Image (tube, rainbow, N blue to C red):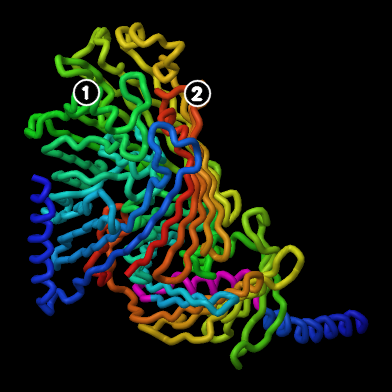
Amino acid sequence: MRKFVYAAMFLILAMGLVYPLAAEQPDPEELAYESYETAYFQGDDVRWRASMEIVDDQDRTRSRVLTILRKNVGEESQKYYAYFHEPSQLERMVFLVWTAAGMEDDDRWLYMPATDMQQRISGRQKRNSFAGTDFTYEDMTGRHPDQDEFEYLGTDEVDERPVYVIKGEPRDPDLVEFSYYEMYIDQETKLPLKGEFYDPQEELHRTLRLPEFEEIDGYYTPTLQVAENHSTGSKTTAEMSNIEYNLGIGEDIFAERYLRRPPTQWIDP
Amino acid sequence: MKLIKPFVFAVVWLLAAAVSVNPAVAQLRIRGYAEPAYSVRYGDAGPIDDRNTLNETRIMLENQWYGGQGEVLDLRFLAKPAAAGAEVEDEFEVRQASVLYPATRDLDVIAGRQAIDWGPAQYEFVNDHFPKDYRSFFLGRDLEYMRAPADALRLRWFSDYGNLDLIAMPEFEPNRNPEGEVIPVHFDGELLDQEEVLEKTGDKPPRRLPSSSPEDGEVHARWSENYGRWEVALYGYRGFMGNPAGFNADGTGTFVYHPEMASGGASLRGPFMGGIAWLETSFDDIRHDEAGESEGLPSDVYNLLVGYEFDHTPTVTYMFQVHWLHNYDSKGLREDIDEENHPYEKRNRYRLQLATERSYMSDRLTLRARGFAGLQVQDWHLRLEADYEWSDNIRVYAGSLHYDADNEASRFGALQDHDAFYSRLRYSF
């Protein structure tokens, strides 16, 4: 009987010691979902202006200025409309993207003012360059967490802010150019402050950073993002401005009708 | 007559400029590009001695003014000043002078000069009967010039039952084909330059157009709807063949003309196995020859086209499409021309198009290859191009055009001595 009491006391003590430790270690998948929702799904809709500067390894610069409209449709679907203001050779170019969780490929349309042609384009490759920048399409619309398996790596600091570090490995490696990535998620806001992507040789080949963010309309919102391609030495800095949430943007404008003529109630061409 | 369009355009331009003085619409600003281009033929000269096929600077000026109710005034003006000492004249073209007016919540009206295209195929036009500028295509100009503008009234109706486009063109606008200026043409069984063609026709126009009255205009229609992730479209057309495929003779000599035509078709385009697939079909009914016995009339044609494009990697894209053309009532024509020696007029023709695009340096440099080929006889065309984004304003293009054919009457036969290198530099402002 005494042995049983000692054993029970030991078990209770052990549980008391171990359980809090287990509770402190967050679920990496939950973190990934929370971070994805925070970075890409806040509000019913949002409009912002992105001013991008691309600097290549020889310090030559190019620019992209665009207005982006995003609308959440249902639980896990979104529609994006991107209108280019600059440079002059891309002015009036429009990307229309419909994306949904669980879909291997997005639905994408492109209007090229240079050829004055609108066309539905392949949406399978989400990892190709977005309009010649170091951002990918997936950086713009988000990589859904169900595409990866996650592992919790610990805590760290990014720009003096405490972060959780998780590792994501793609479930289908054939669809991506990286073998795994490490994401640094702000402990307070759940924004992904840094993402490091490693190639199959385990060399760091791409970094995404989010050095600045603000609370706008009650949502933590990135205002500065940086994408660096370590393989090419190219870097793109994107400054976000004029950010407004919940404007009541209608779903009807995310359609081919508005590729050639921008919806002027939402975009000042 | 030639001066009327530039004059009308100048008036519209001045009106638009006057509008821009209004601070309420101060966003109006002129933009566009200047594009010097040069190309040189390196193959045998053929009937035309001049090796320099393209030596020009094109200047595009454009503006779009957006009104408060969704209306858009769209102006695009192309100028090609003649080079110093050149014998050719300055050229001006109104590429676009249109007003879009959203008449109701579901209806857009677009009136004026505009370049229109439709159909999912790439540079094989099955249901797209809008005018094309093949001259620009074969000279190595940018592919944007392949769509020739026309005066049109366009109604676009958007509904829960699909989108309907109706386009009326009061005057027939033919395709712009080489006429022997710098690219020889196949005429009356021979490969000739422009002067030789005129000699054969007794200085009469070698090509006769339908009248400019509205009865000889064109009507285009397209209905489209998305079913799931696939777009389904139906098409209709009533007008004339874009190419002068009919031939006849009168007291003054041989001439070619644009036979009347009606066409109906359908297309399907959507995601398939990680890429985009398309299927398009049409029946072109060449009018007034139901028995198919008129020697100078081409036959009715059934078209079926299948295409597929996919991204092999994030920076490499492949595309292929096969176009089957089946000639129906061509009894008279076929008896007259001897099919064995004119394989171009076979009852069934197959055209293949292959293309690949590779981008480097975050899309700064793009390499393209596009090949067109007839599958039954040697008749092919290859375009190779490198496109480099030098800066925000400057883009440089360099490429080459290659042709080969067994028969001068085939699709690329007249161009077989026209292999050329070209380069263009576009400065956008």
Badge 2 or badge 1: first in the primary sequence: 1
**Quadrant, the N terminus of chain B:** top left
Residue B65 in the image: state x and y as whole percent: 18, 66
How far from the left and from the top, in percent, is residue B358? 56, 53
**Vertical relation: A240 (above or below) B28:** below
Residue receiving disc 2: B406
Q: Residue at left 18%, top 28%? A: B203
- Mark linked to residue A253: none
Disc 2 marks which amino acid? Asp
Q: Which residues are magenta?
A: A26-49
- Assess disc 1: are there few (<14), some (14-19) or many (≥20) residues with their C-alpha within 10 Å of its C-alpha: many
Residue A42 image position (x, y, % from top left): 42, 73
**Residue B186 drawn above or below residue B392:** above
Q: Give the distance between the C-alpha atoms of the residues marked 2 and 1, in whole angstroms.
A: 27 Å
- Give the residue drawn at x 30%, y 41%: B133
> Horizontal placement of B308 versus A246: left or right?
right
Q: Is residue A45 magenta?
A: yes
Q: Which mark is residue B201?
A: 1
Q: Chain of mark 2?
A: B
Instruction: Indicate left or right for B381 with A169 as reference.
Output: left
Q: Position of residue A185 (x, y in %)?
A: 59, 80
Q: Is residue A252 visible?
A: no
The verdict on residue B308 being magenta is no
Q: Residue drawn 52% across and 25% down?
A: B378
Q: Residue furthest front?
A: B85
Give the mark toward the camera: 2 or 1: 1
Q: Nearer the viewer, residue B417 or A70?
A: B417
As shown in the figure, which amino acid type bears the numbered disc 1?
A: Thr
Q: Say few, some or many: other residues with alpha carbon within 10 Å of mark 2 (under 14 / 14 to 19 / 20 or more).
A: some
Q: Are marks 2 and 1 on the same chain?
A: yes
